[in-house]
Image: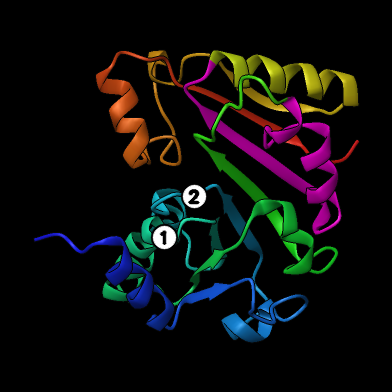
Amino acid sequence: MSKNKTEKFLEFDAFENTLDFNSDTKGKWATIFGNSNPIVLELACGKGDYAIGMARMYQNKNFVGVDIKGNRLWRGAKTATDEKLEHVRFLRIQIDFIEKHFAPGEVSEIWITFPDPQPAKYRKRLTSTKFLNLYRNIAAKNAIVNLKTDSDLFYESTLETIAEEQLEILENINNVYAQPSVSDLMKIKTFYENIWLKEGRTIKFIQFNLNK
């Protein structure tokens, strides 16, 4: 029998690798991780598939999965605990308040994996100008943003924002799995990505510099 939401919330709070809006983390991540390695965020991480996948590949980086839904984060926290991935944490907050939990320059890279496309609300899209400005307040000067999405709307909207902000695109793939070869990072598939692929949706990827 699967755990219900209440059980998952309670267990999530009990994990040693989880934090929430009450946690004192801003400027203290090096202490939390016990090292000064670069910090990579997975925003709207759901079950934390990318944070976990990248942590398996890179021991010299720290990973923080961020989402508001503790019952989803429970899966990532449990996997990280079971696999003894000590360089992974999960933070349960609304992304709008990300500045309260990271100090300027504390983040080196951001991944946004299959976010809600917010079809009627541009400002709520995680690559809108509003959110890019929030990220700039916590990220290093050379930080990059990675977006993986099945949404044509989100993909096109992100490209428009990048153009308006005059940011540099490092990679732009409008059909990831139509490529002759796929990088190890692209091979990481989230829970929702597997669903979209079964439905025949096309997966897009954009990597760009956060700052001009």
Judge whether 175 appears above or below 46 on screen.
above
Density class for disc 2 (Cα within 10 Å; few <14, some 14-19, many ≥20) is many
In the rendered image, which quarter is residue 122 located in?
Answer: top right
* Residue at 31% in and 61% down: 5
Nearer-N-terminus badge (2/1) = 2
Q: Which of 172 and 160 is in front in this view?
A: 160
Whole-percent x, y for residue 134 in the image: 81, 49
Q: Nearer the viewer, residue 181 or 150?
A: 150
For the N terminus, give its image quadrant: bottom left
Amino acid type of the residue tagged 1 in the rendering: Leu
* Residue at 80% in and 24% down: 162
Amino acid type of the residue tagged 2 in the rendering: Cys
**Whether label 2 touches label 1, CB < 8 Å:** yes
The mark tally for this picture is: 2
Which numbered marker is on residue 45?
2
Q: Is mark 2 on a helix, strand or loop?
A: loop
Which numbered marker is on residue 56?
none
Q: Which colour scheme is used?
A: rainbow
Residue position marked by numbered label 1 in the rendering: 73
Furthest-front residue in this view: 6
In the rendered structure, the answer to whether residue 140 lies left or right of residue 35 reads: right
Whole-percent x, y for residue 132 in the image: 80, 40
Density class for disc 1 (Cα within 10 Å; few <14, some 14-19, many ≥20) is many
Q: What element carries label 1?
A: helix
Segment tinted magenta in the rendering: 122-151
Residue 133 falls within the magenta-colored stretch: yes
